[in-house]
Image: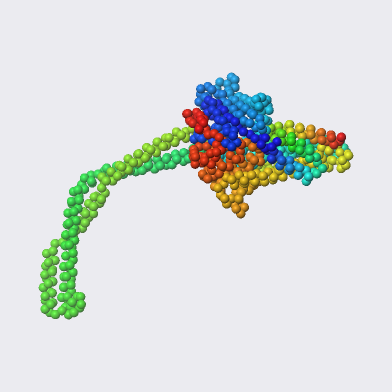
Amino acid sequence: MTRLDNRVKLKSLTIKNFMPYKGLSSIDFPMDDSRNTLIVFGDNMRGKTSLLNAIRWGFYGYAYGRHLRKIPLNLLPNSEAVKEGDWEMVAQIKFEAAGSQYDLRRVARPKKHVAVIQKPEDIEVELHLQKNGAAVAGNLIEEEINQFSPEQVSRFFLFDGELLQEYEELLIEGSDHGKRIKDEIEKVLGVPTLTNGREDIRNILKLAQKQQAVEASKTKELESIAERYQEQETKLESLKVDLSSLTMSLRKTHDDRVTLDDEIEKYETVFVKKAQLDSFRARQKEIDSDIKAKTTERKMLVGDIWKDFLAPRLSIKRDSLIGEQQELNSLANENNKIKLLIEQATLANESSACPTCGTTINEDKLNSNRARLIELKSKLNDFKFDEERSFDVAVLIKTINKVLENKVGGRLVDLDSSLSSDEFNLSKIENNIDNLEEELKSYSLEQLQRDRQKRDSLFRSETTLSNELEQTSSLIDKTEVEIRALSTQMQPKETSRKTRAGQTIELCQKIYAVFDSSVERFRSNLKESVELNASLAFKEMTTQEAYSGLKINENYGLTILDQSNHEVQLRSAGAEQIVALSLIAGLGQAGRASGPVIMDTPFGRLDTKHRKNILKYLPTSATQLVMFVHDGEIRGSEDLDVIASRIGAQYEIKEVTPSHSVIQKR
Amino acid sequence: MSNFTKDIAIQSLLSSVKEVAPDLSEDLIEQIYAIEKHNQFNGDEEARFKAIKVLIERYIDDQIG
């Protein structure tokens, strides 16, 4: 069968009461190969992801919520329809695959005798499939779908931004999540056909070895080897029980931890609000204390308000005192001058020489000086300078200044204004505190604290369990080596003497060796193929000509190579998205029959040029390209010009009410 | 799984036969692979185990003649 024979194409999707789509809604997919692109426009929260989920639920019976968690079935039916008593939910997908026409219809409705639906178990789901007009038996439907579109492959044709981002995990060595994605990728690529084959042959080999041991125990010379073989077999069984129990514990611990992580993440906003509340409470305390201090100061100021009434009179008094002080100061200066002159004249008379230059003074001048001295002394006697008064005046001026400086009225006005502003702020803060307390009432922060401690403890348990698991696996390997050696010892050397069990062992050992050796060979060939296809897709989509391609790692993670084939360590969010799309293209080409690609909000992190490149490339890599986008991602003719000739249909999601959307042709 | 990867899987198995067990029947390996491929996505481990066991028993019967 050629790849073309296996082609899958969607014809139509009809849904009833599915998530925001109340009543019936439908989309016809373009069937013309040259116009194979369908675009559905819709604002955020209108139901783009719900359309992706409708296809997922129709094919596989589940829908994803945030963090790729399955949404409980009872939450899928449209809430308005449910209020009106219409619980029936339908997803019908018509498609063609490998030349046959299919009509798939999944219906959910309440179980009989269930009055109010509260849990998924209250709903029954029916699945019908018609192939070329004939009904396919219920137990064969899943197998029929798996032939052309297995659930495990869906991540490569039904995806959204969140699923794309997951591929970045593949670049983190040792990441648990990366390992799980790698396992899923290998499922799609068919690696389990070889690993399961290896496992099945190993089990048949073991059965034959057991049979051989039973036969050997009946032979005297092999009795002791058979006994040791039985002991090792018992040990192996016990180790496997331990391994299985450890694996289950680890899985449960991991799931519990992830659930708690999600819960704690939900609490992140609560924590932000709690921090706000604490900050508001601290500010409230601060303002309260300010108000108290200001009120006390105000009381004191009110006690001193009389000073303000005296201020005008005190100013006049101060001015008059300043005048008096100036007069007194000038008198004091004059007084000091006379005293100095008397001192000099007295000295000249006593020494008959000039006190400044020492020259001898003649008798005439001495007489004149004596007369001057008498005159000065008389003037000093007549001079009235009140030194005590001068000191009092200075003290009075200082006191009045002090009273006038501290104007109580001005400070009181400032204080009242500040108090009023404090009270306004306090009331605002108290309102915020009330609102936050109300919002936080339903959350137990103590519970959150306990959850965090529990999460940390689960994380530690996970590490311990992983170590124990590793040790047990290693013991199992050693025991198996021992069992193989004992089994060989029990086998006769000559083929003619070999029992049937011995022949089965010999054959299975060879088949096991073939499968074991081919697993890594297959992986290596696949990686080469994925790397090549992803690189080709990458070069079509990237805008950076300096990139030469992509390099695949052990986990199927892809790294960009520059012109010199060196790995580019840092890449932008947009480049991550291009790499993820390239990986999907590479895996899609290696891992499934040619089919449609359905993407929800795929251009979130991309610039115009990358968008154009992707829009140009994707319609050529799939039978149909279906995109659910918002106006911010694709800007009308500016972006769509590139694929105008490939667009087969355009739809728009319109809101009727927040819980009721409709799909209209554009 | 596409025919493309099926080809790679078969090629890998047959190369391994040549390398590690050249006297082993390639036809037997292809038949085991066909059972595994058919049951890859249905999760029925018992069905594929039983089918391969029967295949091996028949092969040994044929060898014994």
Q: Quadrant of the N terminus of chain A?
A: top right
Task: Tell me which corner region of the image, top left, top right, bottom left or bottom right, holds residue A144.
Answer: top right
Task: Tell me which corner region of the image, top left, top right, bottom left or bottom right, holds residue A165.
Answer: top right
**Image vertical order of residue A225 relative to residue A127, above or below:** below
Query: Residue A20 versus residue A395: which sits nearer the camera?
Result: A20
Task: Tell me which corner region of the image, top left, top right, bottom left or bottom right, holds residue A468.
Answer: top right
Q: Tell me the residue at 73%/42% (across/down).
A: B11
Q: Position of residue A219 (x, y in %)?
A: 87, 37
Query: Residue A247 versus residue B55: which sits nearer the camera?
Result: B55
Residue A439 seen by the camera:
yes
Count of picture labels: 0
Q: Position of residue A138 (x, y in %)?
A: 66, 25
Q: Tell me the residue at 19%/53% (across/down).
A: A318
Q: Tell me the residue at 71%/33% (across/down).
A: B39
Q: Position of residue A80 (x, y in %)?
A: 50, 25
Q: Tell me the residue at 43%/41% (across/down).
A: A279
Residue ranking furthest to the top: A113
Query: Residue A665 versus residue A81: which sits nearer the camera?
Result: A665
Q: Position of residue A14 (x, y in %)?
A: 57, 28
